[in-house]
Structure formats: structure tokens, C-alpha cells
Image (cartoon, grey):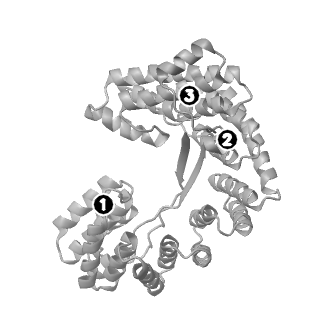
Amino acid sequence: MKHTVTLLVALLLAPLAAVHAAEDGTKPEALRLLARLPSINVNVTMGFQSTDFEVHKTNAAPRKSEAELREVLKASPTNAAAWCELGEQLLERAMHDHLHVARLHGDDIPKLLAALQAGRLTRDDVQHAWQLMEEALDCFSKAIANAPEQLDGYLKRLGCQLFFRNCLQAVRAVLGGDQPNLSQFLTTEALSDFQQVARLCPDNVNIQSTLLFFLIMSDGAAKQPGTHFEPAFLAQARTAREETRARLETLAAGSDSKLAAQACEGLGMNRLMFGATDDAQTYCRRAITLDPARDSAWELLAAVQIKAERNAELLAVCTERVRAADTSRNRYFLAKAHEQLAQFDQTIEQLDLILKREPDHFLATLGKAAMLLRRGDEAKAAGCLQRAAALANDKTDPGQTADLLVLQAIQALLRGDRKTADLHLGHALKLDGENRNARAVLRALGS
């Protein structure tokens, strides 16, 4: 059983303010200035899985059926492992037979709501899934009651509450004619289980960092207007934050360099989420010093510079990162950093290095089209745009597909085809309603 949550940290590099001086945003020279490299997100994933806590099966025994497990539990009602396995099978049945999904995580709520709207998910399906979930939670509770010092029951009940229950509650709210409440994803019950797991494995950085992440998210949600969190929950969350941060500080000061680096990264994420970019940078730098190959620490360090709007420092970080690991992704970040400083020759140089290595690299191909449009080489840009469009598919990030459409809109505007440009921009905003490149073009057009 795996549980992950991904944080996209603020991350579309802000558009260059190069068009503001132009009186007429439809002039070719002004339109070309709007051609920018497609955006890229800095992804920071906090996650944990059952194997992290050594609760996975250690033998190759065949899996028992639900009926067999019920017979086992009739004969041995204190069998905690059997209670856990039965609970998992009930959740799997709920997903397979009623929700028609292979997994259920917090980011699946929009998919479930879309299925509900399309009629692929019915009220009865949701009700049956909810009943199976409640029975599964009862199974995990029985496992905990019979083995209170073992992690498995807490971990499975926690995953069910964090992901399964939150997804179903959102769907049930819509069925009842209400707006789903997505602000309090961490309930008192889930927090209690999270705290217990963290206390039972104080040296596991994954669980400590992930718990701190959820606690900070809850703290931010509680400060939003119109939200209400029970005082008891907020007090419990404060205690949990102090405990968890202290464990991470201890691990960060330990002799195991890789473990200490991971702990520093968790603390860096904590400080970044509170807006303390200098502290976050210090932790990230220490993580990289301890473990130079730790890619996620480099990713977080780049996020810190973007959050602080320190473009020169971002360039330095991206340059260092390429020296540490010369990957196409890292070089693309470097190209974006050069673009942010209006160093367009160096931007093109990095894109060409990527394309020499990977001729079918979508972002580099699209970025090259942007640079060619900016330089006024519309013929070559058209070829790159056509190639990028051929490389895009249903797995392409929607924001990056929107960036492709924006460049196609600029291309259409340069040849005087406003109608086609408007169609491309409209489609771009349907894919990514906050797309900054599309908004910049619309502002230039006075729309």
C-alpha cells in the first residue's frame, strides 16, 4: 500500500515584463516578446508506503480470499494480520466493484466527481463503497486493538482516512447538493493515527516529513477565511508539529549522512511553506552537502529561489545542478533560468544541447520554437511548432500543452489571423485557466 502527496511549489517562472513599454501589443515586435519557453513545475513529493515501516509480507504464502479470511477470524478473532488483510480486501472491492478505479488518492477527487457527473458513478455505488469503507475501518480498528504496538493497523487506517474517506466525503457532499469541503483533509482521527505511527518509528524520515507536511497544510487551511477547525484539533496539531520538527532536527544532526540529508530536506520544505526562504535555503544546502546526488533537494532548492524571486541565484543553482547531474530536465531548468535573465543566446544553447541528446524532447522542441519566434525566424519556428504538436499526447502536462497553444496563437497573430489566435488562446485557458503566457497575450491584445 503506497500513499503519496505531491506539492507543486509556486512554480511557473513569472513572465518577463518586456511588453509593458509597447503602446500596441499587436505589433510584430511586441508579439514576439511574448514568446516564452513552456513552463515547468518543480515537483516535491512527500510520501510513505507500508514497506517503509517493515509491515510488508515476509513470506510468499498465497493470498487468502475474503471468505477464507472471515473463517480465519471466526476461529481466531485476535488475529491482527487477518483483520488488516480483510480490511484491505474490502477497500479493493469498493474500488473495483463500485468506484471503478484501481486506486484512490486525494488527487482523485476531480476524477470521481467527473465520473459522477457523467453517470459512470451512481448514488448506490457511492453508498456501497462507503459501507465497505466503514467495515474496513472497523477491521483496522480491531487489528489495532489486538496489536496496539504494531504499525500495520495504524498505517492502513490512516491511509483509509486520509485518502479513501476524503474522496468519498467529497462525492457525498456533491450528491447532497453541497460544495465539498477540501480544506480539512487531516481529521482528528487521522492525526491521532499519524502521531502514533510517527512515535512508533521516530527514525523514519519519510513519515516524520510527511506528517509535518500535512500539519503545515492544515495550519494554512485553518487560517483561510470561512474555515472552521475545532480548537482541540488545532491544539493537537500544534503539539504534533513540535514533536515532529524536534525528531527531524535530531535526525538532521545525526551521523548517517543520507538520513540527515533527507531530514534537512523535510525541514527545508517546512520553512519554505512558511515563507522563510533563507532558512529553507540553508537546510537545502546542507542536504546537498551531505548527499550531492539527492535530486529532490536540488529541486527544492530551485523552488526556494523561485519563491524568493532570486533569478541570479536560481541560475547559479541550476548551473550547479547540471554539474552534479547532467540530465535533460536539469538542462531545461538551466535554460529557463537563462531566459529569466534575458540571456537568450545561452537559453538556445541549452535547448540545442538537450535536442542533440534527445531529438524528440517535447519541452526543448517547443522552447526552441519560442526562441525562434522571439528572434523573428518564423519559418523555422513553424517547423518546431509542428514537431512539438506531433510530440504532444494525452500524457503531456496540460499547462505545457496550453503553452504550445499560446505559441501557436502568437504565430497566428504574426500572420494577421486573429480568429485562429483567439481559438488557440481559448483552448489554452480551458486546459490551464491560470496559464500566465496566455494571460500575457490577452493583456497585450487588450482582451
Q: Residue furthest top?
A: 74
User: Label 2 is placed on what type of residue?
Assistant: Glu
Crowd tier of the residue under label 3, counting other residues whose Cα lies within 10 Å: few below 14, some 14–19, many 20 or above: many
In percent of the image, x 35 and y 73: which residue is there?
360
As helix, strand or loop, the secondary structure at mark 1 comes to: loop
Q: Quadrant of residue 32?
A: bottom left
Determine whether label 2 and label 3 are within 8 Å by CB: no
Q: How many angstroms separate mark 2 from mark 3 (CA)?
A: 15 Å
Instruction: Name which residue type carries label 1.
Output: Asn
Q: Of 150 and 306, which appears nearest the observer?
A: 150
Considering depth in this image, is 40 or 361 the residue closer to the camera? 361
Q: Is residue 231 left or right of residue 130?
A: right
**Residue under pointer 2:** 54
Task: Identify the mark at residue 393; answer none if there is no mark.
Answer: 1
Residue type pointed to by label 3: Glu
Quarter placement of the N terminus: top right
Disc on res. 298: none
The answer to which of marks 2 and 3 sits earlier in the sequence is 2
Location of residue 38 (image quadrant) = bottom left
Q: Is residue 88 above or below residue 278?
A: above
Residue tagged by mark 3?
85
Q: Position of residue 406 (x, y in %)?
A: 30, 66
Nearer the viewer's eye, disc 3 or disc 1?
A: 3
